[in-house]
Amino acid sequence: MRVPHRRSFLKHTLAAGAAAALLPTARVLGANDDVRVAVVGLRSQGKSHLRNYLNMQGVRVVALCDVDQAILDAEVQRLALRGQKVQAFRDFRKLLERNDIDAVSLVTPNHWHALGTVWACQAGKDVCVEKPVSHNIWEGRKMAQAARKYGRIVQADLDERSRRFNDRAFDYLHSGALGKILAVRGFCYKRRLGIGRTQGQGHIPKTVDYDLWCGPAEKGPLDRAELHYDWHWVWDTGCGELGNNGAHQLDDIRWMLREQGFPRRVMSLGGRFGLDDGGQTPNTQLVFCDYPTAPVIYEVRGLSEKPGSETMDTYSFTTSTGRTIRNQWQGQGPNCGLIIQCEGGYIDLAGRAALDNQGKQLATFSNDGAVDPQSNFIKAVRSRQPEDLKTNIEQGHLSACLSHLGNISYRLGKTIAPEAVRATLENDRDGLEAFQRFADHLAVHEIDLRKTPVALGPWLTLDGTTERFTGPLADEANALVKRRYRAPYVIPEEV
């Protein structure tokens, strides 16, 4: 079963109905059987998945896959030094032909997540897929459909769900100890440097199969210095910081609010400030999600606290009563977290604490008993119970959509003067306060929003049943619900 090419993945996976009967059937695992795992994508996060599996009893890593031969060879050799022999693949389609692989971890760039998951489900494999689970809204729904149709265990690898202090903090919140939730504020302040602009002359390593690397995306020249990692900041392959680190905090928010649907509406504003490069996604962004339970404001900053510094800002905001609330983060490096503002105080998730409105600590939340996402995945692979997953693919899809909704609003935005932004937010005190801090942060970097205007996106509404936009600009927004796929790397309408 060599997915496209080799009769176009058995003629587009043997066409819906026949596929379930004719594709490989996963073996039934006994209590003493090892779960045989393959890791696909071996840079940074892939190494983390691999390390977790190697440390588990009853799990055997039997295959590795990466389109970069140099990276693949290095990991195969590293395991060989441990006395462990594995199969090595550059082409994921060949890996799926194997009947001696039970499950795969997909740790690829975003544009491969959905296609890899659908193909793996059709091939009878369980899947642990990295965040964000999809590259667009349509893909996430197809992944959930494939998991259900083929009876596969598919986990959305959202690490925050594995942290026990989150469970404890959210239980405390819903105990009513802090009263009504007033607003939820998420943030990721992480320094990002420019990625260069190469006029299509970017470096593609000779060890990389570039056709496989591109997969569903257009196979064009590289307009940035490096192929790896910086794909996050290009729309054809990535989802910006909102779909990178933001995927974790936005999932936290939906989980914390216990919302099982979409916000009533979403709007975003921002820009790519202080950089002249081939990047397309914003490095400074605000996203507003109007949930029935409470309004949500999510912030992205890629510039440091001031020019020449590597330290990021401390998150700080002023409430309607004039109180300034700061998160308990200190030190160098990225600052990402969540503050849940309530009538009787707030929870600083990064600080793992609940505080009253005067800043006095009321409770702390330990991480005792935390289980890493891969261990949780293997538990569900053995039990065959999707409810054993901390985050199944359906929940992962709904959370990923928050990133996609914010990005779609931003991409439909028009550049306007800061006074016009304030006029749009005039009835939203928290929104105005967040935008003022946004402008002040950029002013420190000598960025004048009158000369370098912000892009303000429209308020968008998504129908939760059809997962299509309705209302003003619905046609333009729906054009971004799904991507164009490059043959033969195509997700079929009927998975």
Image (tube, rainbow, N blue to C red):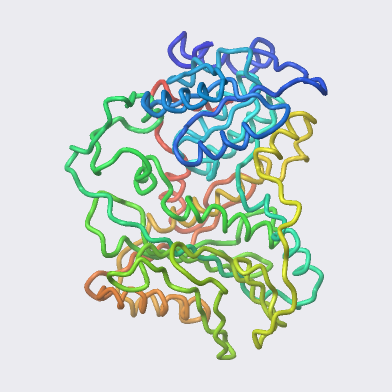
| Residue at 57 percent of width and 25 percent of height | 38
Q: Please state the horizontal and vertical placement of residue 399, each as a whole percent of the image.
A: 60, 51
Q: Which quarter of the figure has residue 322?
A: bottom right
| Residue at 58 percent of width and 34 percent of height | 142
Position of 141 with respect to 190 (left or right) is right
Position of 488 with respect to 210 (left or right) is right
Q: Quadrant of the N terminus?
A: top right
Q: Nearer the viewer, residue 439 or 455?
A: 439
Whether residue 453 is visible to the viewer of this picture, yes or no, is yes
Q: Please state the horizontal and vertical placement of residue 150, each as a whole percent of the image.
A: 68, 24
Q: Please state the horizontal and vertical placement of residue 431, each as a whole percent of the image.
A: 49, 76
Position of 443 with respect to 262 (left or right) is left
Q: Nearer the viewer, residue 376 or 219?
A: 376
| Residue at 74 percent of width and 79 percent of height | 362
Whether residue 486 is visible to the viewer of this picture, yes or no, is no
Q: Is residue 479 above or below residue 181?
A: above
